[in-house]
Image: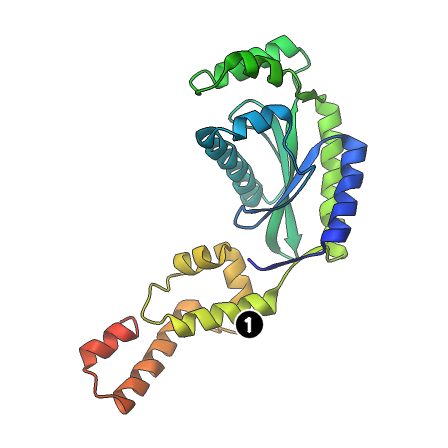
């Protein structure tokens, strides 16, 4: 999705969040692509994990699962990642449309460092890691009680409303709609299923329907079919191509 992000205001806001909570915040768009984070660097433990390509994929997958849970419930979600760390995410909405997610984490709610380190090691025992280094760095993860995590979550939820009201992160509806229409017009012979269009523009189905609802009465599939018919009529009238050739050119 095309998002309009006021980086200056967002940076100031998230820096304030970090000063207050000492927890790292990440913002994703509705297709789970990271668009902003503060601090820029992971914790030393998570940096070590993300330096491993295979584990990096697991970290991204955990973040995606959390965002999906957040999307499906439409509310804040607390989650334990693949390595045993606590993560919390809330939906970032514009009206009824979820345009992204705000997440904080890389913390633990287990106060006993030995217990936490052992639980994390058990989760990661099959990973290709230097476990002496793992043992040192897992102990640097900050502990927050469940009450503290709940308090930080409340602050973050308030942030989502503030970000919406101040348009710090907002959807570029007109620009996205124009790009979608242009893409359809230029690719009538290609796969123009809802799924393929969502993948092309990194948006969810819900967001796609919200963007096109006023411009494509009857739905996107009906409008694509009508465009293909009009293009076929034009080719029949102005070219010597066979019906079979024209069918292929317009995606029938």
Closer to us: 238 or 70: 238
Closer to us: 214 or 2: 2
Q: Residue at x 72, y 30 (%)?
A: 150
Is label 1 in a helix, a strand or a loop? loop
**Residue 129, how many percent across, how many down?**
48, 19
> In the figure, residue 89 lies in which quadrant?
top right
Is any part of residue 213 visible from this angle?
Answer: no
Is any part of residue 198 visible from this angle?
Answer: yes
> In the figure, residue 38 lies in which quadrant?
top right
Badge 1 density bin: few <14, some 14–19, many ≥20, Cα 10 Å: few
Q: Residue at x 66, y 58 (%)?
A: 170
Q: Residue at x 64, y 27 (%)?
A: 43
Q: Residue at x 65, y 11 (%)?
A: 113
**Residue 201, how many percent across, how many down?**
49, 59
Tell me: 15 left or right of 78: right
Closer to us: 233 or 214: 233
**Residue 173, how many percent across, how many down?**
60, 66
215 versus 13 height, above or below: below
114 versus 246 height, above or below: above
Where is mark 1, residue-wise?
Answer: 214
Residue reaching furthest to the bottom: 237
Q: How many marks?
A: 1
What quarter of the picture does the C terminus occupy?
Answer: bottom left
4 versus 51 height, above or below: below
> In the figure, residue 110 lies in which quadrant?
top right
What quarter of the picture does the N terminus occupy?
Answer: bottom right
**Residue 40, how many percent across, how many down?**
66, 38
Tell me: 194 left or right of 77: left
């Amino acid at each position: 999705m095309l998002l309009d992000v006021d980086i200056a205001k967002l940076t100031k806001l998230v820096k304030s969040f970090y000063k207050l909570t000492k927890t790292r915040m990440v913002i994703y768009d509705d297709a789970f692509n990271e668009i902003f984070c503060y601090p820029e660097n992971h914790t030393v433990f998570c940096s070590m994990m993300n330096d491993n390509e295979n584990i990096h994929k697991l970290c991204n997958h955990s973040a995606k699962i959390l965002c999906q849970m957040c999307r499906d419930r439409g509310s804040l979600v607390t989650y334990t990642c693949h390595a045993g760390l606590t993560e919390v995410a809330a939906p970032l909405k514009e009206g009824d449309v979820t345009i992204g997610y705000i997440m904080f984490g890389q913390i633990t709610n287990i106060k006993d460092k030995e217990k936490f380190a052992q639980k994390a090691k058990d989760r990661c025992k099959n990973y290709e890691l230097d476990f002496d280094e793992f043992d040192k760095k897992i102990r640097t993860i900050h502990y927050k009680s469940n009450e503290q995590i709940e308090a930080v979550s409340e602050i973050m939820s308030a942030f989502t409303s503030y970000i919406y009201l101040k348009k710090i992160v907002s959807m570029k509806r007109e620009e996205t709609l124009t790009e979608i229409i242009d893409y359809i017009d230029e690719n009538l012979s290609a796969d123009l299923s809802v799924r393929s269009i969502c993948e092309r523009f990194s948006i969810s189905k819900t967001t796609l329907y919200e963007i096109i609802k006023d411009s494509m009465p009857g739905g996107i599939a009906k409008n694509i079919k009508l465009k293909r018919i009009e293009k076929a009529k034009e080719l029949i009238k102005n070219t010597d191509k066979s019906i079979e050739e024209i069918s292929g050119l317009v995606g029938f």
